[in-house]
Amino acid sequence: EAEVAQSPRYKITEKSQAVAFWCDPISGHATLYWYRQILGQGPELLVQFQDESVVDDSQLPKDRFSAERLKGVDSTLKIQPAELGDSAMYLCASSPRGLATQYFGPGTRLTVL
Amino acid sequence: GQQLNQSPQSMFIQEGEDVSMNCTSSSIFNTWLWYKQDPGEGPVLLIALYKAGELTSNGRLTAQFGITRKDSFLNISASIPSDVGIYFCAGQLRFGNEKLTFGTGTRLTIIP
């Protein structure tokens, strides 16, 4: 069964350092999403890609966060510099073109010390 | 951001009991999805609903797309230990925009 892959699964970093997360969506899925999930809450959308183009990044803190999907397949989310408040689960999801049915990866648990 | 209201926030049940939870909103949704999330893992899609009034089952799970399109319901029959986790509803507000709005979650605990 096709799955969304994410790495690393866990990341511990010190504040002011740079971190990067990688996501490989289900093959053929045109739409890719990055979410942030605070413990005890639902996921909140950071950025949505359609192929290689950003569709929605209204909730992405652009002063420190960046995301790219250069070839319209896998994607990287970067935080520079990391702050204590960035500690959270970062989830990647993908969906077929035109459908809202999203499939999530296992997530990356970020801890900023 | 906007989130859907899920009820109850948490449930403590005994193994074998049936479970019901719901998700409500003041807005009309075009698609409803139900996910289950285990600790430290990403949400797993359980059921997708695409039409008002639709009733869909996945094993012991049954979900319904409310007729008003402002709510959805999830039932679990004869709960087992592996049902423990957090259940999230999610809705798509507008066709043509795949963005989902997520509920606040229902935490299910099974009492030994």
Image (tube, rainbow, N blue to C red):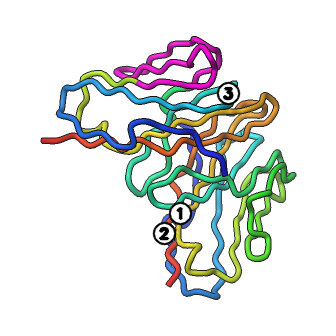
For disc 3, the marked residue is B29
> Distance between the Cα atoms at labels 3 and 2?
35 Å
> Distance between the Cα atoms at labels 1 and 2?
5 Å
How many labels sit on residues? 3
Residue B85 in picture, x, y percent from top left? 35, 44
Q: Nearer the viewer, residue A48 or B51?
A: B51
Q: Amino acid at mark 3?
A: Phe
Disc 1: CA contacts within 10 A as few (<14), some (14-19) or many (>=20): many
Marks 1,2: beta carbons within 8 A? yes
Q: Nearer the viewer, residue A28 or B108?
A: B108
Residue drawn where x is 79% and y is 62% of the image:
A68
Q: Are marks 3 and 2 on the same chain?
A: no
Closer to the eye: label 3 or 2? 3
* Mark 1 vs 2, N-terminal side: 2
Q: Is residue A63 above or below residue A69?
A: below
Horizontally, is A1 left or right of B74 in the view?
right
Secondary structure, mark 1, is strand
What stretch of residues is rendered in magenta?
B48-74
Residue A25 in picture, x, y percent from top left? 66, 48
Q: Disc number at residue A10?
A: 2
